[in-house]
Amino acid sequence: MDIVVHVGDIKSGSSICADDYFHFILEQFERLKDPLVYTPGDNEWTDCHRANNGDYLPAERLAKVREIFFAVAGETLGGRKKQVLTQADDPAHSDFVENVMWMESKVVFATLNVPGSNDDNLDTNPWSAPWNTPAFQALQTDEQTTRDAANLDWLQMTFDIAAENGAKGVVIFLQADMWDGTTAALNAYPPLVAAIGNGALGFGKPVLMIVGDSHKYVVDNPYHPASPLHNLHPGTPTVPNITRVIVQGSTTAPDEFEYLRLTVNPRSSTLFSWERVPLKIP
C-alpha cells in the first residue's frame, strides 16, 4: 500500500502562521489520492512567536495544528483514509494525537513530534514578547517536558510492538535534524538520541530514521563511531543497524522540487531502498 508522509515545515520560517494558510495546506493534503501522515515541524508552531511569523503563542499554534490536521484521531489525511494507532488513546498522553503508528510489509512505522529550534527549549530558544513572562516561560518548559516524555513513551512502544509482532524493521519519522551543525544549540536532544540508539540496539534489525529540518539530502549513520557526528551528543551509543535519511526540502531551487520514494521489501536481504524523485511544478 502506498502511503505519503510529510515530515514537517509546511511553511517557511519567516512567513505568517495563519489559520487560513493551515487550511490551505490541509486542502492540498486532501487532494492526494493516497493516505497521508503528517508530523509537525518547527516552522508551523515552535517558531511562530517571531514577529515575522505573526507574534503567535507557540503552544496555541500547536493546538491549532492538532485541531486542523488531526481532527479525527487515528485517521490519516489524503483521499483514501487509513486507520493508524494514535498516542491520543493513551490517557497519560491524550493530547498527542499527532504521534501515530502503523505496520505495513512487516515494518513498524511511527511519527514523533520532535521539532527543530532545539526542541522548543526555553534556555536556547525562548519565546519572544509578549510570551516571555514567567508564566509563559513556565508554559514553554512544561510544553517541552510533556512532549519529550510522550515521545520517549511512544518510541518505546514502537520498539515493543515491533518485537512482539516479529517486525523486520522500524521506520521513525520526525522533523528535527538533531545533528544539524548549522544550528547554535542542540543540547535538548541527547535523551532522545540515546533512546533511539538503545532501542535500535535492543531491536537488532534495520532501523531507518527519516527527518527534515535542515532540508539538504543526506544519508548517514550518526551512531557509527566513524561518523564525525557520533560524539556530538553525550551518551550516544554505537549502533550499526541505524540509517538516517534527511530529505531534500526548501533549499532546492524553486523549480527543482523532489520527494523521496521509499520501498520496503520484506522478502529481500535489503529491507529498505529509496530513490530521489524529481517533481516538476507546472
Image (spheres, grey):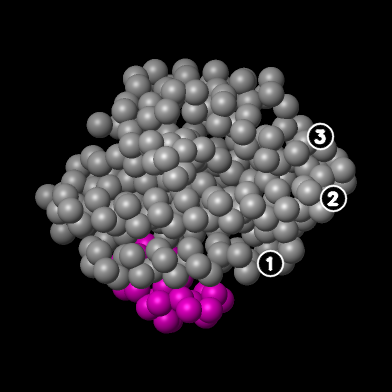
Looking at numbered disc 2 in the image, what kind of residue is underneath it? Thr
Q: Quadrant of residue 84 in the image?
A: top left
Residue 131 rendering spot, x and y as whole percentages:
82, 45
Looking at the image, is 204 positioned above or below residue 87? Answer: below
Q: Measure the C-alpha gap from mark 1 to mark 3.
A: 24 Å
The residue beneath circle 3 is: 54
Q: Which residues are magenta?
A: 220-243
Looking at the figure, which quarter contains the C terminus?
A: top right
Query: Could you tell me which residue is drawn at 55 percent across and 31 percent down?
Result: 66
Looking at the image, is 43 positioned above or below residue 153? Answer: above
The residue beneath circle 1 is: 185
Estimate how packed mark 3 is, as few (under 14), some (14 to 19) or many (20 or more) residues with alpha carbons within 10 Å: some
The residue beneath circle 2 is: 133
Looking at numbered disc 1 in the image, what kind of residue is underneath it? Ala
Would you say the magenta stretch is mainly helix, strand or loop?
Answer: loop
Residue 21 rendering spot, x and y as whole percentages:
67, 24
Residue 117 rendering spot, x and y as whole percentages:
67, 55
Residue 197 rendering spot, x and y as whole percentages:
38, 68
Q: Measure the C-alpha gap from mark 2 to mark 3.
A: 18 Å
Let me know if residue 11 appears in the view.
no
Left or right of 230, for residue 57: right
Left or right of 259, for residue 44: right
Q: Nearer the viewer, residue 160 or 280?
A: 160
